[in-house]
DNA sequence: TTGTATGCGTTATCAT
DNA sequence: ATGATAACGCATACAA
């Protein structure tokens, strides 16, 4: 007893196997009740289940979406990123959840170099790729065009870079950071630091850095470069930033810090709490993303919420939509400051 | 200009496409330098990249591993589990990382009912499934046998249930809980509570519950049922347990709690810290798993470490190994208490 | 060392 | 409404 295929169904139902295929794909749209019933019966009886690999091959569609994670700090394996940076975790989960509904597979890879990624994309004949780097989209699209492949490229990042890809799902970075700063300013804080990842290599960080500077300027606040704390975007990076923040609090009267990622805030929490500082009494902290960890922290983190899961879902919708005739469209998702308990009015006691 | 296939390579290199296939798969192991060079050149020139779907079909292997997540509390979508329970997150990431090295794909599904899962497994022609429920393995194996499919079933759970599957990767639950209890007893605690998920439906929870009871007995400690706090294994569940724990501290002199999952400890942290209790001064807490969040918490969590990532990797190794002639073997992984700062000596001041 | 013939399970095209 | 034939891209027995 071998694998059950449509041919087996056909034999059992007494039709050609092509008819079975037609029926399964609801083509022609007309079948005699007679045959329909017999096919159904045969399927039930034999327990037929379509083979996805064969289907992919014949349909010339892979029904799979790829995600190219940014290069991980040390390791090549993207898995380390998934563990170190909860953002990617939640994003991937979001993609997976939506892809589900389309019966579409999800595959991951880390960025190593353009060649590798391209090879990867092509070997899967991906329906679409989700990229965290827009530049790569250029090469991929060109190559896809050259090979006459239908491939959607969706970019997660800064709207400025959108030209390289078919569509992008961005957020309002300026507004996000602006809301955080305004909130703190409204609470009376005047020396506000920034905790960020490297803003020379990361456009997103650069945008948030610029937004921070701009917001300070608009509020007529001091924005010296010494208030900008840069490190790797990870828990460890956040801890190290915490050390430096401690000095800023002491020497520069810093009473608040805006973080470009929740995980940085988490690291800062660790360092400050360890030495007995109180949040938000001694310092106000805001995060960015609103990940799971934001509510895990104590006190819960006031943070700029970008709905990661919905953003991820939208990427999938765009890609799938393209195969149903919709033309891809870029989206800018709103962002909203979620008030929790890591920020408080400025007190002169510092 | 269409897709580049081995036939194109063959034409370019002036050989039969079968020779190209042989070469690509290193079969026969002997090729004239002449043809090898020409094939290589053609591949480079045309930019040939193998089509995975075709390969899967022809090789009768899917090169993909499936993970069946346990049923999620409310939602059907497994994605919610990935967000609510970091354990699965890290496990999946671990599988992904190792599957990587084998150039194997990973697909997920949530448990809905046996039928669905079976259909899912078959439609992918999975090389192997990783299950969190052993009973399901029985049906899947029977069906695979009936259809003459080569399919490895690997179980993550309790060693007691191992008969239903080809292999299992378990941990020493008894030792884990035992170490936690011993540690607390050694610190002088005598009223030790347990925070756990439902132990009627979850064999793992049942095992840890039993281990807890046994450990208390061996230490000649009171182990009344009122010390057992049950709720959903999630942050929210942990918070609710925290409320009840507060009462136990007040009325029953409870000074320590053993949690069967880090996420439960995290929830307890939240509740206790919110009302001003100090950890570990007012109560000692131990976790189980040693996930990322264990070090994110402040104070860092003393917890029973099971190396989730390695456990996940081992599952993949087992499945892949089976296709290289190795017979599957079950493993019991060691478990180790990691001392951090959520536990302290008992003080009478309670 | 290389090639011929056949098969993997499904879908697409074009008849009937 | 149903079916014959070819195609999808690759791999394997077997032959030469």
Image (cartoon, coloured by chain):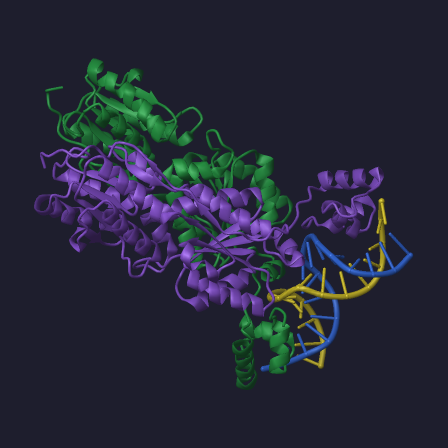
Chain colours: A green, B purple, C yellow, D blue
In which quadrant is the N terminus of chain A drawn?
Answer: bottom right
Question: What residue do we see at 12% from left, 29% from top?
Answer: A345
A140 to A57, vertically: above or below:
above
Name the side, left or right, on which A155 lies relative to B342: right
In which quadrant is the C terminus of chain A drawn?
Answer: top left
> Is residue A67 visible to us here?
no
* Of A44 and A172, the residue lying toward us: A44
Question: What residue do we see at 19% from left, 35% from top?
Answer: B279
| The quadrant where residue A307 appears | top left
* Residue B185 image point, x, y percent: 23, 39
B160 to A121, vertically: above or below:
below
* Of A220 and B164, the residue lying toward us: B164
Residue lying furthest bottom in this view? Answer: A34
* Of B197 and B170, the residue lying toward us: B170
* Of A236 and B303, the residue lying toward us: B303
Name the side, left or right, on which B11 lies relative to A323: right
A245 to A159, vertically: above or below:
above
> Is residue B292 visible to us here?
yes
* Residue B181 image point, x, y percent: 26, 42
Question: What residue do we see at 65% from left, 78% from top?
Answer: A16
* Residue A177 image point, x, y percent: 28, 32
- How many numbered marks, from 0 up? 0
* Residue B343 image point, x, y percent: 23, 35
């Amino acid at each position: 007893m071998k694998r059950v295929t449509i041919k087996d169904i056909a034999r059992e139902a007494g039709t050609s196997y092509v008819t079975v295929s037609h029926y399964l794909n609801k083509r022609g749209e007309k079948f005699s009740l007679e045959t329909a019933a017999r096919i159904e019966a045969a399927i039930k009886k034999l327990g037929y289940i379509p083979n996805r690999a064969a289907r992919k091959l014949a349909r010339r569609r892979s029904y799979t979406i790829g995600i190219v994670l940014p290069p991980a700090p040390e390791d090549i394996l993207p898995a380390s990123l998934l563990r170190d940076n909860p953002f990617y975790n939640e994003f991937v989960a979001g993609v997976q959840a939506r892809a589900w509904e389309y019966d579409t597979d999800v595959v991951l890879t880390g960025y190593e170099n353009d060649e590798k990624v391209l090879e990867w994309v092509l070997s899967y004949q991906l329906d679409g790729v989700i990229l965290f780097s827009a530049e790569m989209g250029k090469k991929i699209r060109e190559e896809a065009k050259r090979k006459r492949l239908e491939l959607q490229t969706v970019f997660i990042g800064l709207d400025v870079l959108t030209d390289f890809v078919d569509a992008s799902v961005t957020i309002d970075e300026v507004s996000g950071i602006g809301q955080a700063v305004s909130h703190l300013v409204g609470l009376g804080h005047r020396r506000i630091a920034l905790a960020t990842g490297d803003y020379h290599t990361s456009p997103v960080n650069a945008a948030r850095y610029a937004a921070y500077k701009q917001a300070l300027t608009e509020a007529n606040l001091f924005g010296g470069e010494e208030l900008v704390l840069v490190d790797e975007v990870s828990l460890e990076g956040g801890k190290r930033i915490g050390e430096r923040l401690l000095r800023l609090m002491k020497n520069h009267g810093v009473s608040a810090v805006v973080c470009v990622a929740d995980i940085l805030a988490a690291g800062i929490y660790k360092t400050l709490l360890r030495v007995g500082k109180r949040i938000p009494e001694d310092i106000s902290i805001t995060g960015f993303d609103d990940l799971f960890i934001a509510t895990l922290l104590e006190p819960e983190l006031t943070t700029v919420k970008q709905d990661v899961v919905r953003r991820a879902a939208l990427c999938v919708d765009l890609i799938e939509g393209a195969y149903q005739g919709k033309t891809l469209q870029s989206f800018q998702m709103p962002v909203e400051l979620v008030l929790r308990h890591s920020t408080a009015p400025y007190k002169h006691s510092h």
